[in-house]
Amino acid sequence: MKIGEGLSTGRFSLSFEVFPPVREGNLGNLYKVITELSEYEPHFISVTYGAGGRTRDKTIEIAHKVKEEYGQNVLAHLTCVGSTRDDIAAILDELKDRGIENILALRGDPPEGEETFTPVRDGFRYANELVEFIVSRHRFSIGVAGYPQKHPEAPSFEADLLNLKRKVDAGADFVITQLFFENDEFYRFRDAAIKTGVRVPILPGIFPLMNYKQFLRIIDLCRPTIPSRLGEKVERLRDKPEEIEKYGVEFALEQSVDLMENEVAGLHIYTMNRSWPVKVMIDEGLRGLLPADRLRTPPGGETKTTKT
Ligand code: FAD
């Protein structure tokens, strides 16, 4: 099913992101997680595209399996990194032939150690060019990335919003945001995007924190605003990974409840290939807020929190 069409009905969207594991041996665990996540009947499951374009085949293979074997609607991420137009055309043909109907069109990050993004010869410089190209090839539903705190390379919040609008004008029919921990920033972003003319659903990206090392990495990569209560607590628990994990889920749940009370179009949860944080969030809070037809109780009852 095309994600854009589903979102246009106004039905609340619950979705999960997974990534292709680096080690082949971890694929079994990923599929176990996908089985567990599928119990929550998400609107879609998205599969990332590795930095530097290095998971191209795995992304396609996993996305295909999520759709065909797990019966889930799937969103395949695609970046411009290291690919010419012809490469992208071939990937789009393959996605279409494999029955995948939705693409998250991204520019991708510069390689580690480089400050600026340099497209390959005959490649794309910005995601709006990729969106335009996808539209010219096949009828996919297209999502794009949005940044509540602005993209780190953008000269200003306003300039970044105009660039988001370019992607929507080029044919994107929904936006998924970068992770954030300060909901007010999301509301400011949503209001400003609407004022700028971005009239497509915006799905907030929610990230349940896992550990201290990851917390530092996220700050470095995504530069989110860290509310003082979150920052102080994580610092205090820095040597207690189990407790950070627990607090991370609690915080993500609190954030999600507030977002739902503020009429978001849906929630997109960055699962990091774990199902238990999702289970806790849904069974301990979100279930009561989701429309009755949105979720059924997973086999075995409510919160079964074995850690996957
Ligand atoms: P763009 O929209 O092209 O923006 C990049 C920068 O250029 C911004 O500063 C923007 O303001 C500016 N800009 C955009 N268009 C123009 C223009 N026409 N003229 C001038 N300036 C312009 N990365 C991966 O490698 N794999 C993934 O699977 C992946 N999934 C992601 C999922 C989500 C939901 C998000 C939010 C990010 C994801 N990323 C992923 C990271 C993403 O690739 C990086 O954030 C990247 O740096 C920017 O990608 P973009 O598509 O937003 O780029």
Image (cartoon, rainbow, N blue to C red):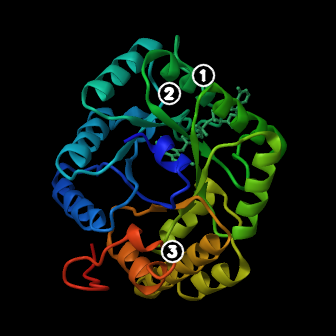
Mark closest to the chain's N terminus, 2 or 1? 2
Task: Residue 80: give its label.
Answer: 2
The answer as to whether callout 1 falls within 8 Å of ligand 1 is yes
Q: CA distance from mark 3 to mark 2?
A: 31 Å
Q: Amino acid at mark 1?
A: Glu
Residue beneath the point at 50% across and 42% down: 4
x then y, percent, for residue 242: 40, 85
Q: Is residue 126 visible?
A: no
Q: Amino acid at mark 3?
A: Tyr
Q: Which residue is mark 3?
A: 212
Q: Is residue 26 left or right of residue 162?
A: left
Alpha-carbon neighbours of circle 2 within 10 Å: few (<14), some, or many (≥20)?
many
Q: Is residue 193 above or below residue 218?
A: above
Q: CA distance from mark 2 to mark 1?
A: 9 Å
Mark closest to the chain's N terminus, 3 or 1? 1
Task: Residue 129: give its label.
Answer: 1
Q: Amino acid at mark 2?
A: Cys
The answer as to whether callout 2 falls within 8 Å of ligand 1 is yes
Residue beneath the point at 31% across and 40% down: 59
